[in-house]
Image (cartoon, rainbow, N blue to C red):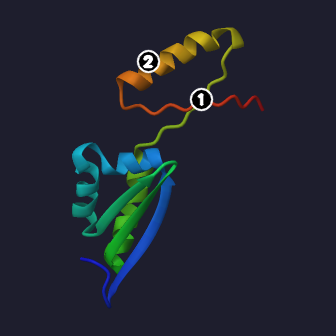
Amino acid sequence: AGKGPDGGMEVLKFASHHGRLIIGRKGANVQSLQLESGADINVDIQDPYATVTVMGSKDVVAKGVAAINRFVLDHSVSAVVALDPSAIGTVLKQLNSLRENSDVRLDVSDDRT
């Protein structure tokens, strides 16, 4: 596949951690997405963003974009947890341990609204 007379191309932007998720270990996820959709998928990570280029026929590009968006949505989890200020030090130590010892991405916000 590739961009040609009947081909198409779409460029998607994600946070860089989603780009790494799309690539997967040793490229396993992006290869699976390419097989599923038939699209050529290129992921370029330039922190803090990832640019994902999807190429092929117009139908194949549409399938690739849908597969990528579904994959990211299916593999993303978001939670909001209120913490007692006296527990923050202990919680941050646990979060740092998770970050160092797993593939989990954790973001902590000091949003008190």
How many labels, in total? 2
Residue that badge 2 annotates: 97
Amino acid at pointer 1: Val
Q: Position of residue 27 (x, y in %)?
A: 25, 50
Mark 1–mark 2 distance (CA, rounded to whole Å): 14 Å
**Picture quarter with the N terminus:** bottom left
- Taking the spot 36% from the left edge, 32% from the top edge, the residue there is 103
The answer to the question of whether label 1 and label 2 lie on touching residues, with beta carbons closer than 8 A, is no
Left or right: 88, with 12 as reference point: right
Residue that badge 1 annotates: 108
Q: Where is residue 53 in the image (x, y as percent from the top left)?
A: 39, 67
Tell me the element at label 1. Answer: loop
- Taking the spot 21% from the left edge, 62% from the top edge, the residue there is 35
Left or right: 25, with 104 as reference point: left
Q: Residues within 10 Å of mark 1 (few under 14, many from 20)?
A: few
**Picture quarter with the C terminus:** top right
Q: Position of residue 102 (x, y in %)?
A: 36, 26
> Toward the viewer: 75 or 20?
20
- Taking the spot 49% from the left edge, 60% from the top edge, the residue there is 13
> Toward the viewer: 14 or 64?
14
Earlier-in-chain disc, 1 versus 2: 2
- Taking the spot 65% from the left edge, 31% from the top edge, the residue there is 109
